[in-house]
Image (spheres, rainbow, N blue to C red):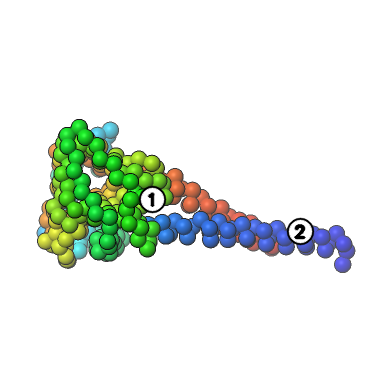
Amino acid sequence: MRADSTREIFIGTSYRITTILASLLCISIFLPARVNAGFSLGDAANYAVLYEGAGSHNLQINSSPVNGSTILGNVGVGTLSNGTPQAQLNNPAVINGNINFAGAVNISGNAVVHGTTNANVASVNSDLIYLNSLSSTLGAESGTALAISIANNATQTVNASSGILDGSGNRVFTISSMSFVNGATLVLNGTASDFMVLNFSFNTHFSGKIQLAGGITPDQVLFNITGGMNLTAGDTLQFAANNVPQAGTFLDPNGTITMNSVNLTGHLFGGDSSDMQIVSGGTIVVPEPSTYTLVLTALGMLGVAACRRATVKQV
């Protein structure tokens, strides 16, 4: 064999080994860190609203749009517990997203819907079942005791680092009491790699502003309303805050949900066997993916591309 041929084989083999090692490095160092960094919303992250749909009840949306939308994101209507829900979408609501039904399409009203309306979308129920299990699992964890008590024109800051770190990488808080009046501001401070879980075991009323700081995103902050079981008898979730902004993911599988006069950047999931109402100035916008998530996705794509290049080179 000629020396130059041997050299080419050596170089080609070295290139393949280096490329594969680089790919494995990206996958083994970066991607598992994301998996263990805290809770995941899974496919539900694509939805602004997911309604349980148990019983013969309704998802009612009739708020005026803000910046062109009442709901900017997808809406999912489940059929858990053999429910036959209806989406009552009335003027002046504007839905900039798809409306997916786990069962048959059942809509009344004359709101403007810019997306598609789809029947028999199985992932709606599977997303809800996953979220309900997530709520139960996280709600059973021990967290740092925290009283939220904020007067008008006052601010309370909660740092993610003060929460109890669970085995999945979540910073967990157990809310012992809450007084959150109009004009109050709650600041949740955490990095882009922090995940905060705030567990509530009582009826809630969010009347002030909720701000995120430090790089943490609405997909990484979970307001988990516990209580009840089997989509009934849970604690209520109510928003009424004079059109102030709030941010985060709100999950209440077993309780009644009523939103008015709040501009939420995040997600609203749950609704038990009662009507869910988004009325009188309530709006929801699905947040953009976090930079942290985008970087990890890009690393994964680079890893796949590197493996493909190594395969092509080998051929």
Q: CA distance from mark 2 to mark 1?
A: 43 Å
Q: Looking at this view, is 47 or 269 the one in front?
A: 269
Q: Residue 268: horizontal and vertical position, in percent? A: 24, 50
Q: Residue 129: horizontal and vertical position, in percent? A: 26, 63
Q: Looking at this view, is 65 or 216 the one in front?
A: 216
Residue at the spot x=32%, y=57% of the render? 164
Residue 64 appears in the figure: no
Q: Looking at this view, is 142 or 224 the one in front?
A: 142
- Amino acid type indicated by mark 1: Asp
Q: Residue 291: horizontal and vertical position, in percent? A: 44, 45
Helix, strand or loop at mark 2 = helix
> Which quarter of the picture shows residue 246?
top left
- Amino acid type indicated by mark 2: Ile
**Label ID, residue 11:** 2
Q: Looking at this view, is 189 or 136 the one in front?
A: 189
Residue at the spot x=53%, y=61% of the render? 28
| Crowd around label 1: few <14 · some 14–19 · many ≥20 (10 Å) | many
Helix, strand or loop at mark 1 = loop
Q: Residue 36: horizontal and vertical position, in percent? A: 42, 60
Residue at the spot x=27%, y=34% of the render? 68
**Label ID, residue 172:** none
Query: Circle 1 is placed at which residue position?
Result: 194
